[in-house]
Each structure stands twice: as C-alpha cells, then as structure tokens.
Image (tube, grey):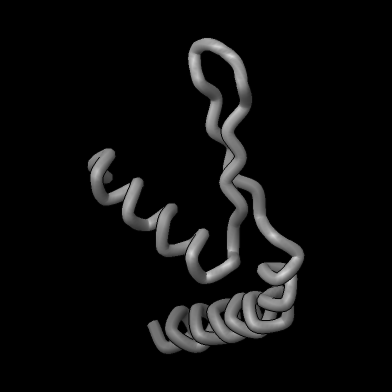
Amino acid sequence: MSTKVLAKELKDLEEHKLIKRTVADVYPVLVEYIPTDYVNTLSEVITALHKWGLNHRKMITERH
C-alpha cells in the first residue's frame, strides 16, 4: 500500500469517527491512531462475519 493510499484511508477512518489521530509534541513527530469507542460497536458485526466465514470454509472443504 502506498503512503498516499494509506494517508487517504486513515483520513477516511478519522472522518467516519472510527479512529482518532493524535500528534505528539516530540521530535521526530509521532502520530498515533487509536480506535474510538464508536468502533467498538462493530464487534457484534465482526463476530458474526467471523462465524459465517468459519461455517463457509467448513462447507467448502467438506465438498472436496
């Protein structure tokens, strides 16, 4: 992933309130991205997708 693409993705995540960007007042500059409390609301969705993925893998491998 290029630096330009990464910067755009991080900016999008920040605009959607999924991460918070913090710049430390040190040299060299330290930029930290941390997940917001809001991103934690995705945990049930991610768990459901994980479960679906495991079931799907099992279904596919049992066919062969």
Front position in the image: 16 or 54: 16
Quarter of the figure that contains the N terminus: top left
12 lies above or below 42: above
Q: Position of residue 40 (x, y in %)?
A: 73, 69
Q: Position of residue 59 (x, y in %)?
A: 50, 88
The quadrant holding residue 41 is: bottom right
Q: Is residue 38 above or below residue 26?
A: below
**View extreme (front): residue:** 25
- In the image shown, does 20 or 25 lie closer to the viewer? 25
Q: Quadrant of the C terminus?
A: bottom left
Q: Residue at x 43, y 53 (%)?
A: 10
Position of 11 with respect to 8 (left or right) is: right
Q: Is residue 28 above or below residue 64?
A: above
Q: Is residue 53 left or right of residue 48?
A: left
Q: Residue at x 62, y 26 (%)?
A: 24
Residue at the limit of the structure toward the top, as seen here: 27
x, y percent for residue 15: 48, 65
Total marks shown come to: 0
> Against 7, is 27 above or below?
above
Q: Quadrant of residue 53?
A: bottom right
Q: Residue at x 32, y 54 (%)?
A: 8
- Residue 25 in the image, given as x and y percentages of width and height: 61, 21
Q: Residue at x 50, y 78 (%)?
A: 57
